[in-house]
Amino acid sequence: MWLIHTAKPSVQAMSRAVVSIDFMGTGSFVSDDGLVITNHHVAYADVFALGTKEHNWLEEGFWARSREEELPVPGRQVQILKETIDVTAEVEALIAEGAVKPGGMMMRKLSWIMEKRYSEKTGLEAILSSMWRGTKYYISLYEQYSDVRLVAAPPVSLAAFGGDVDNWEWPQHKGDFAIYRVYTAPDGKSAKYSPENIPLKSPAKFKICTKGIKEGEKTILLGFPGRTSRYAPSARVNYLTETELPIVSGLRSKQMEIISSWMDRDPEVRRKYADYYFGLSNFQELALGQMQCNRRFSVVEKKRAEEARMQEWIDADPARKEKWGSMLSDLDSKYQAVRKAQEDVIWFRECIARGTRLHSVASRTAALKRKKDSTRIAGNIRADKRNFAEVDLRVERDLFRLALENYYEHMSPEMLGDYQKALREKYGKDYDAMCAALWDASWIADPARTEKFLTIDEHMNNLESYLEDPLVRFFEDGKMGDFNSRLSKLQGKPSINDLSGEYTHALYGFREASGIAQYPDANSTMRANFGRVMGYSREDGLDCRWYTTAAGMLAKHRPDVHDFCMIPGWKAVADTADPSMKIDFLTDNDSTGGNSGSPLLNRKGQLIGLLFDGVKESLATDFYFIPEFNRSVNVDIRYVLWVLRNYGKMDSVLSEMGVK
């Protein structure tokens, strides 16, 4: 994941055709008039939000066959990287002058100063990034565009064929693509949506490769990877593997079972929860895969072996020994000291803060005790109305029942609030009765009382009675601040975060002294890396070929299973495909979250595919890169073109993309 400004000039030139989509995904220009292609799952929330009861674009698919039919996407922005500047010397000067003091707020203060300085100087969006925990600092300058419109999004049964079952797996048969168009004001400057706006004149674009690819072919990946933790100490990886990831993946798996069962029973629940379930599923699979791969590939042991060599390097120099001599043992000790406290934080977060989507309603209501004014109340009412419109109370009740049991069964008794302790005394482990007492008696779960509450007069005149609601009291009986304070006290000084920063500096110095080429962890800055088209050997020893075909996709079709059901119109078109047509393919490019939608290029810089996933065996690479098992999953651009022509009937867009 090399920083783009360190790449070859030819690669830097290619990067002008790449955009960030709000730093949650990557896209690329494929026409002169602002067409941006990315993954369907990057556009998923937009496609979901643009849907109506009359048109569920997720299920139906959306095709704008003229520019007048393109749909504006409220709130969506794209960013074009203009320049990256090394500002390490400027930042070090600010620190030396005392303008910024070391501590937990240092990066925030630095960012405010440096971003303001460069935004005013250039008129561009400036973002400061720290590499290797302050070893280097860079300013990235972006042109930001706010009028983004949806052009094409295939139905989810095509884009996410195989659904959660195939997520992080191989083989896959997903047509994971979507297309936006970026618009500007008539003078070419960034502007909010207006009917008078015109398509952006793309600064560069990728030519589409229609000749196909072959095994062993060299590839280039460009994008905005979100985050890796390859400089994390072994103590951190061990904590995640043995504590946090098992809890998160286990509980969210149970939440998914509840939501899935309701979605299968009620199409309206599926409509409401599709986007939420998608995010839940993706994170749960990631957490489970990281835990399994960290264990399978002995990531903790590999890191400890490198740390042993680093300790020898530290001990060989008196100055290094004075600075870092006990750093590794201190990290191990502190992680052991806070292990149970960290578990409590996770259970509180997963069960209380996000166990049900209506926790935020209770939290906003309780916050009015501190400040009650009509402006704030009006904002609460708007947010609460959105909340209630997006959920089904039957689903949320089942989720709350799950959260109740897991919270009481795993939380340290001393961290329970007084009201929560009283409930425990009264109901013991009868969580059905406890759930009924809280949920069924709450105004939050009563549509009639909720409708009455969602008025300014009711908030102003009768707020106290709503604050005494049993569900509100339960949710507000514990505070994340109390859990964090306990963690800080147990850690002492220096904190785990402070030691982790020193660890990164020491590891950087050790690798540099050892002549080991290194690059910083991903942090949403543009990166480039190189790979090849190739298959791999799976965990069970099976050799997997590097591509999948239309024949394999059709063989998976199951009319009675939502994730594998091709809707009738799409199935009829797919039946006409050449059975040998390639759908998805594998490369050994290095990728992580944020790379979704990244253009995959051949050695000529032509677009051959879009990255959308990785195989499960690659999930350890967020902490330790394992090249023999790292594989990225890409949708073949020729399959995308085939779908656009034969199913979407998007001939005008294909012509615009230069495809005959």
Image (cartoon, rainbow, N blue to C red):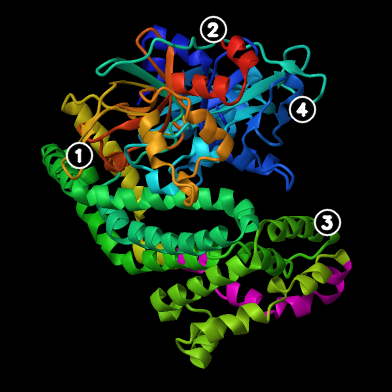
Residue underneath mark 3: 375
The alpha-carbon separation of the residues under discs 1 and 3 comes to 56 Å
The mark lying in front, picked from 4 and 3, is 4
Kind of residue at disc 2: Lys
428 w.r.t. 95: above or below? below
The mark lying in front, picked from 1 and 3, is 3
Q: Measuring from the top left, give residue 368's x and y in whole percent.
A: 74, 67
Residue underneath mark 2: 660
Q: Is residue 21 left or right of residue 135?
A: right
First in sequence: mark 2 vs mark 4: 4
Tag 2's secondary structure?
Answer: loop
Depth check: 87 or 191 in front?
Answer: 191
Tag 3's secondary structure?
Answer: helix
| Dots 2, 3 in contact, CB < 8 A | no
Q: Quadrant of the N terminus?
A: top left
Kind of residue at disc 1: Arg
| Residue 473 lies in the magenta-colored region | yes
Kind of residue at disc 3: Thr
Depth check: 544 or 370 in front?
Answer: 544
First in sequence: mark 1 vs mark 2: 1
Residue 400, by quadrant, is bottom right
The alpha-carbon separation of the residues under discs 4 and 3 comes to 27 Å
The mark lying in front, picked from 1 and 2, is 2
Please give the label number shown on residue 25.
none
Residue at the (60%, 25%) spot, across then down: 648
257 w.r.t. 660: above or below? below
Mark 1 Cα-neighbour bin, 10 Å: few <14, some 14–19, many ≥20: some
Q: Quadrant of the C terminus?
A: top right
Q: Which segment is the magenta one?
A: 457-485
